[in-house]
Image: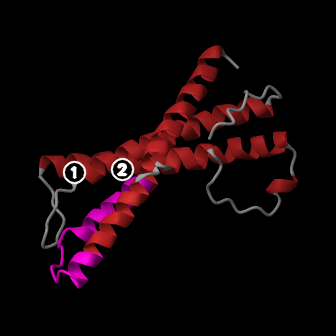
Amino acid sequence: MPPALVRYVRFVDALNRTVGRVVVWTIFLFLLLLLYASFSRTVLNVPLLWSVETAQFLLAAYFLLGGGWSLKADAHVRMDLLYSRWSPRGRAFADSLTAFCLFFYLAVMLLGGISSTHYAITYDQRNYSAWAPPLAPIKIVMVVGLVLIFLQATALFIRDLARWRGQPLPEDERT
C-alpha cells in the first residue's frame, strides 16, 4: 500500500480512538443528569423541563461520536452465518464489497444531516417542547459523528483491500 494511505489509516484510527475515549465519559453525564432529574422530581418536587431532552441529546452524541471508534474496534453488530468460516482474505474481500453499501448509506445520511443542519442554523430551528432548545448543536454533532464514521469506514476499506491483496497493514492493538 502507498505510504499516504497507511498514514491516512493510522491518522483516522488515532482520531476515532481519541474521540471515542473522550465521548465514552458522556454516559456518566447522561446517568448523572437522569439521577438529578429523578431526585429533583421526587424529593424536591421540582420537575425539570430540560432534563429528558438533554439526556436524549447526550445519548445521541454518545452514539454518533462513538460510532467511528466502535467501527474501528469491530464492536458493531454483524450477522454471521458463514463469515467466521472464511479465511481472512475471504472476509476482507467480502468486507470490501459490502463497504460500498455502507458508503452509500453514510453518504445519504451525511447529505441529509448537512441539509438538516443548514436548515436548523438558518431558521433557528427549535424542538417542539415546553423547553424548546435549539436543534443546531445536536445536528452539528450528528454531522461530525457521521464524518468520523465515514472516515473510519474508508480506513477499514483500505485495510481490507490491503489484507485481500495479501499485504495486511499493521494492526494497532490499542483500541
Report the Cα–Cα distance between label 2 and label 1.
10 Å
Q: Position of residue 86 (x, y in %)?
A: 86, 50
Vertical position of residue 32 compared to residue 140: above or below: below
Vertical position of residue 119 compared to residue 127: above or below: above
For the point 62% across and 41% down, which residue is it?
A: 175
Q: Nearest the camera: 65 or 162?
A: 65
Q: Quadrant of the N terminus?
A: top right
Q: Quadrant of residue 174?
A: top right
Principal SS element in the magenta part?
Answer: helix
Q: Are marks 2 and 1 in contact (CB under 8 Å)?
A: no
Vertical position of residue 87 compared to residue 57: above or below: above
Observer able to see residue 108: no
- Check residue 128 in the rendering and tell me which mark sits there, or answer none: none
Question: Mark 1 = which residue?
Answer: 136
Mark 2, Cα crowd under 10 Å, few <14 / some 14-19 / many 20+, is: many
In the rendered structure, which segment of residues is drawn in magenta?
38-62
Q: Is 48 colored magenta in this rendering?
A: yes
For the point 73% across and 27% down, which residue is it?
A: 170
- Check residue 142 in the rendering and tell me which mark sits there, or answer none: 2
Observer able to see residue 67: yes
Q: Position of residue 61 (x, y in %)?
A: 37, 54
Q: Amino acid at mark 1?
A: Ala
For the point 22% across and 76% down, which residue is it?
A: 40
